[in-house]
Image: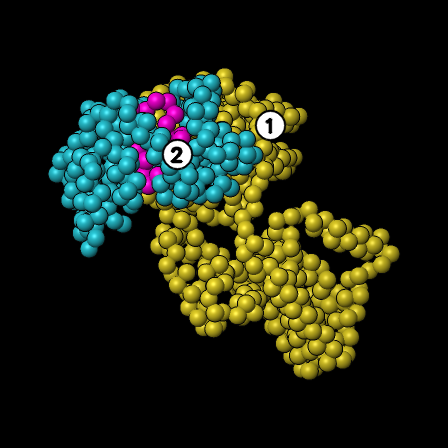
Amino acid sequence: MIEAINLSKTYGSDTVLNIEYLSIPKGESFGLVGNNGAGKTTFFSLLLDLIQPSTGHIMNHGVQVNISEDWKPFTSAFIDESFLIGYLTPEEYFYFIGDLRGQNKADVDALLDKHREFFNDEILNGKKYLRDLSKGNQKKVGIIAALIGNPEVIILDEPFANLDPTTQIRLKRIIKELADDPEVTILVSSHDLLHTVEVSNRIVALHKGEVVKDIATSEETLKELEAFFAV
Amino acid sequence: MFLHFLKLEWKAFTRSASMGQEIAMRIFMGFLGLYFLVSCLALGVGLYPILHKLIPDQKPIHLVNSVVLLWILMELALRFFMQTLPTMNIKPLMVLPVKRQTSIHFVLIKSIYSFYNTLSPLIFVPFALICVQKGDISLSQALGWMIAVTGILLTVNFINFLLKKKFADDIKGLLPYLLVVLILFGLEYFKIFSSSRVVAKGMELVLQYPLLAILPLLTAAGLYFWNFHTLKTKFYLDASLKTKTQEARAINLSWADRFGSLAPFIKLDLKMIIRNKRPRATVIMSAIFLAYGLLFYTNKVYNDIPAFLVFVGVFMTGIFMINFGQFIPAWDSGYYSLMMAQNIPLREYLRSKAGLMYLSIVILFLGTLPYAYFGIHVVLLNLAAALYNAGINIPVLLFAGSFNKKRIDLEKSVFMNYQGTGATQWIMALPTMIAPILIWYIAYKLGNPTIANLVLGGIGLAGLLFQGPISNFIALAYKERKYRTIEGFKQQAS
């Protein structure tokens, strides 16, 4: 269960996020949509305690994220390339994250093997450092690394951007599979309404930092969202 | 078109993210520049009387002519290492209706307006004018001579440009040319063939026939076009803008596993050091500085001022600690968000950095052991200094690191690289170096060297004993400034 209470973030006189109350129950597949500057990344950064809230706070499984570090063992995320270590090879990076999350080499190998298809033979044994991979391949590494160690909360910011169509479809399959697990809460943001509708069972639309839609996904959701964003 | 380019340059300069923060650095560099300009001018004015006094039976102009080749070589070496070539962000320009030639001319002409091109004229112009005033040469001779020297200066400028463009990535390619220089030097040394005399003869000819001054200018022009063509062929994305990819090399660091929970971080830091230019250069420099002791221990003067030897000890055993520690946590600036969001308690993170520095102090201390040759007191002093470094200086540097918020590009070379350097680094130099000297010196004055060593080492040991509570305190400081640090590291350094 994740709760945002009275949460706001202000830069000078600019309020970029203002959420009175938002709760995300355990096991939910939560989709966050919105235009540029709607506050999606801001929300995720607050959830990961990378920026300081101007007011309010976020509780992650009963831990107030800006006070205690105890949310870290069960939370993982891929926000942007600042989550990658450029001078490591993909394998070294995976093992490093594995070390941090108490996974041994075999555990990590098993996970990598499971997602071999997602990598499309472009990542592993490539003799390349992460900094030399293409944007799309870097993203693949970041996404899979966020799954290491069976986290209960997974946060993916714009995971579909920069991926090729085949990989997008494979990623949707992975997210749906995670969504089926009642122990895993997965938070995904996207510009792409269709993708989000497909993988999430609840969608929140942000506009200028405010929650403007909060709907459980159904047949009509896509139409409703499209109608909202078609201005 | 050039005007547009100049406007872009000005905007790039004034809008760079570091503009405000680095103002102190800029002022410092400004003063340094001014100092060099004034020194050169003073040398230019004073050269004639000095030479006249030292070697009265020869005309100063002839003496100067005889060292022109030496000057060329020195100027070239200085520029190769210090001068940064003007660069231009050509990627956005390639699809715009800008002629390729124009941008290349712009870059080349811009290189003429370099600070390094103003230094030598400040010497030779006053010198030549004084020569005229003293009646050694006529005005037309002086004019020709100055033009020739200017031509040589420009030639050096463009040779450097060419060298840097060609050899910046591949320093080994330079070896054959260095070999030629060495051979010429050898021939000169063994008085077989003097190339400096050839150049001197040339300069004398210029004095005889001032019109010959056109030759160096022509050489410079020729080099200008050589550069132009080199650049022209490089002016394609796939040629020079394509980022080079290195083949990843696996490193076996399993020996580091014995550090337990700190092992992953220590291994990460070791890879960081091995695979990135800047931290690698830092380590190599540390090794070189081990030789620093030779300068001091062999010199009687310093042996009589034992406080100096404290400085040497702190410096030699702590050079890696200082070079590495002062930029913690900026080494991880590229992925600091990850470090802060991943399952890493800040305390562990800091302890791993401290661990790496302890390791370096042990290794460097072992490296100083051969200095036992100069007496056992040297070893004891270095041991005390090493303990002080480990117990006090490491926590101090770590604490100071919590104020770091400047990004470091790991792949930029370390030489004359002030990236990531802020007020913190300058302020930290004082307590880390001066405090141990003072402590030791006071104890030495009140007692004797042994007591002084015991006091200095004892303070270090006390620091080591209390490292638990100290690192909690430091971790708190990091947590307090975490958001500021993350934000600072996100800013691309210019």
Residue under label 1, please give it.
Answer: B368
Label 1 close to label 2 by CB (< 8 Å): no
- Quarter location, residue A22: top left
Q: Colour of chain A?
A: cyan
Name the residue located 74 percent from the left edge and 77 percent from the top edge.
B212
Q: Colour of chain B?
A: yellow
In the displayed structure, B184 sits above or below B131; it is: above
A154 within the magenta span: yes
Residues at marks 1 and 2, CA–CA distance in whole angstroms: 58 Å
Name the residue located 53 percent from the left edge and 39 percent from the top edge.
B276
B338, B290: nearer the viewer = B338
Report the amino acid beneath label 1. Answer: Thr
Residue at disc 2, secondary structure: helix
Q: Residues within 10 Å of mark 2 (few under 14, many from 20)?
A: some
Residue furthest front in the image: A219
B387, B330: nearer the viewer = B330
Task: Identify the mark at residue A231; answer none if there is no mark.
Answer: none
Report the amino acid beneath label 2. Answer: Arg
How far across and down, in percent of the image, does residue B306 sit? 54, 32
The region drawn magenta spans: A143-159
In the displayed structure, B144 sits above or below A6; it is: below
How far across and down, in percent of the image, does residue B195 sit? 80, 61
The chain letter under disc 1 is: B
